[in-house]
């Protein structure tokens, strides 16, 4: 028998092979324990690098990825690795650091143990002169940071988990993370202001830092213009350049304001270069902003953008319960359920309902029950099912997918047309009181089994496609507006 000496590269490839085998077994276990969306997002991108002895090294795409896995899947991962590799198994992460588009390098991180003491918060150092200057000016901004906008008061759900984790991570290590700037975006009333202010409040209390500024982009713009008018532009600039954590809310307001954008651009550079943290919010994804200078837009995209989605039913319930607690009231479960079922688009509207309900009930001196709730909230909660028609759905879907009504009613099996047709049928079933037969007839004289099939297909496809969920959400929003 021939004996070939083992070479270095033999060992390497054996270790790689062993890692792949072990990781495959791990994935099979993990997949059974978490939902498929999370599995796809967080586990499929991981690359097993080597298994040497009982130490498994896996490669993750970013520091944030690593932190997220450690925070959310630590115990599952640990159990699985011990099961598959053995009692002394160790896990090491290799994090890809994107230095340039072509040259990813990796840094090694040991598995972070929760037993490690949290890093000691260190007050952010500031010069005396800067401190005085800040103190002289900051009164203008006091009151903007609402003390109740904290992480503790922010209810976590699937709709906001990623944004919340990123915000917390920034609050722990302002300026010393890869999320600079952190951009939180999402529709109205979904919690953007709450979340970005929670970062400010956290840093203020926990790190005892003084140089925190929350400002809306309107306020910034108004200040900027009056600084120009009163010849105080250099004071204005100096003020902003001395901030350690700058939070600017609703940056979409900067659209088409070139002079303000230029100022922001310089402030951004100065802060970023000196390791200060910037947090921004926007009512839509940055790339959809029009009238924002390219160089500013590209700066804004240096860090991490993360979105807030409309809350799902469970999160809506949890938020309502928390708001009741805060108000020191309780409401019967069917009332809470009614609100959570009917007010779906944003949290602010839901709060509005609760306040109106409590106020009216106390004025009338009556206990709140379901009939009273329905009558008090009838102006706010319209019977949307009655207001949305198949024609409206047809129009909204055709507009959205950029296809013609003839296509949607026709026989084409082209993928994008078939999908639009199925989406239309699904929405027809969900949002109108129409029968399957009527829906089928409307969309090209199809029979009811085709409608059932379409509904099932969309129902299932949604589970695995964030894009489709976004499409549906957007369509429902548009239909809501059309039905007003
Ligand atoms: P936006 O800035 O996105 O328009 P806000 O941050 O003003 O929205 O949120 C609207 C209201 O809803 C606020 O009172 C906020 O406290 C509340 N809110 C939003 N999301 C949550 C959440 N996840 N948990 C608790 N309250 C929330
Ligand atoms: Mg806001």
Image: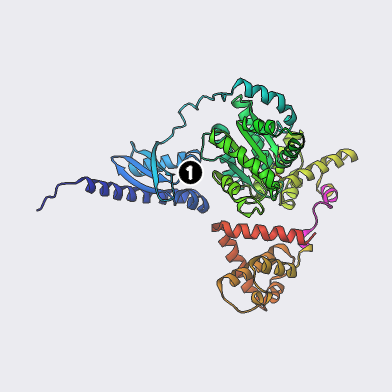
Q: Position of residue 166 (x, y in %)?
A: 56, 40
User: x and y percent of residue 410 in the render?
Assistant: 64, 78
| Observer able to see residue 155 | no
Query: Was residue 376 drawn as part of the magenta stretch in this picture?
Result: yes
Q: In terms of image quarters, where does ligand 1 lie?
A: top right
Count of number-bearing discs: 1
Q: Which residue is mark 1?
A: 65
Q: Tell whether position 395 is magenta.
A: no
Residue at 48 percent of width and 53 percent of height: 40
Q: Which residue corresponds to the image point at 73% horizontal and 29% vertical from the top-left?
A: 142
Q: Which residues are magenta?
A: 373-386
Find residue 429 and report its image quarter: bottom right
Q: Quadrant of the C terminus?
A: bottom right
Residue placed most toward the observer, 170 or 100:
100
Q: Give the farthest residue toward the left.
A: 1
Residue shown at 63% from the left, 67% from the top: 401
The residue lying at 66 percent from left, 34 percent from top is 237
| Mark 1 element type | helix
Q: Is residue 226 above or below residue 124?
A: below
- On the question of residue 255 being in view, the answer is yes
Residue 327 location, x and y as percent?
76, 34
Q: Is residue 110 left or right of residue 7?
A: right
Residue extending furthest toward the front: 231
Q: How is the image coloured?
A: rainbow
Could you classify mark 1 by the number of other residues whose Cα lies within 10 Å: few (under 14), some (14-19), or many (20 or more)? some
Nearer the observer, 145 or 288: 288
What is the x, y in percent for residue 346? Answer: 71, 48
Q: Residue furthest right?
A: 364
Q: Is residue 417 left or right of residue 148?
A: left
């Amino acid at each position: 028998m021939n004996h070939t000496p083992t070479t270095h590269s033999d060992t390497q490839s054996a270790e790689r092979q062993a890692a792949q085998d072990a990781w495959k077994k791990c994935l099979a276990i993990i997949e059974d324990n978490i939902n498929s969306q999370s599995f796809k997002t967080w586990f499929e991108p991981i690359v097993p690098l080597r298994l040497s002895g009982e130490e498994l090294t896996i490669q993750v795409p970013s520091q944030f990825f690593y932190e997220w896995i450690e925070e959310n899947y630590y115990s599952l991962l640990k159990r699985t690795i011990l099961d598959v590799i053995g009692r002394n198994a160790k896990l090491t992460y290799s994090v890809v650091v994107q230095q340039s588009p072509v040259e990813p390098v990796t840094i090694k991180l040991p598995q972070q143990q929760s037993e490690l003491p949290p890093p000691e918060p260190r007050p952010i150092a500031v010069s005396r002169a800067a401190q005085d200057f800040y103190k002289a000016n900051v009164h203008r901004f006091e009151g903007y940071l609402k003390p109740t906008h904290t992480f503790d008061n922010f209810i976590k759900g699937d709709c906001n988990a990623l944004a919340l984790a990123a915000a917390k991570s920034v609050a722990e290590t302002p300026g010393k993370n890869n999320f600079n700037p952190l951009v939180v975006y999402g529709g109205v009333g979904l919690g953007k202001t709450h979340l970005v202010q929670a970062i400010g409040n956290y840093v203020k209390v926990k790190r005892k830092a003084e140089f925190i500024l929350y400002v809306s982009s309107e306020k910034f713009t108004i200040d900027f213009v009056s600084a120009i008018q009163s010849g105080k532009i250099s004071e204005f600039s100096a003020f902003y350049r001395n901030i350690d954590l700058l939070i600017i809310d609703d940056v979409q307001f900067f659209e088409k304001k070139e002079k303000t954008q230029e100022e922001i651009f310089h402030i951004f550079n100065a802060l970023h270069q000196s390791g200060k943290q910037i947090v921004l919010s926007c009512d839509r994804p940055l790339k959809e902003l029009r009238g924002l200078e390219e160089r500013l837009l590209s700066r804004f995209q240096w860090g991490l953008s993360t979105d807030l989605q409309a809350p799902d039913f469970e999160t809506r319930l949890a938020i309502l319960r928390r708001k009741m607690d805060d108000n020191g009231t309780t409401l019967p479960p069917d009332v809470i359920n009614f609100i959570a079922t009917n007010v779906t688009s944003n949290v602010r509207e839901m709060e509005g309902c609760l306040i109106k309900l409590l106020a009216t009930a106390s004025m009338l001196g009556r206990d709140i029950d379901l009939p009273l709730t329905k009558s008090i909230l009838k102006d706010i909660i319209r019977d949307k099912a009655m207001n949305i028609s198949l024609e409206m759905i047809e129009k909204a879907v055709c507009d959205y997918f950029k296809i013609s009504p003839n296509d949607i009613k026709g026989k084409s099996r082209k993928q994008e047309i078939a999908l639009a047709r199925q989406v239309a049928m699904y929405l027809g079933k969900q949002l109108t009181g129409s029968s399957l037969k009527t829906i089928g007839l409307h969309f090209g004289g199809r029979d009811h089994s085709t409608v059932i099939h379409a509904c099932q297909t969309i129902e299932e496809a949604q589970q695995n496609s964030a894009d489709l969920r976004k499409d549906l959400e957007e369509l429902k929003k548009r239909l809501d507006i059309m039905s007003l």
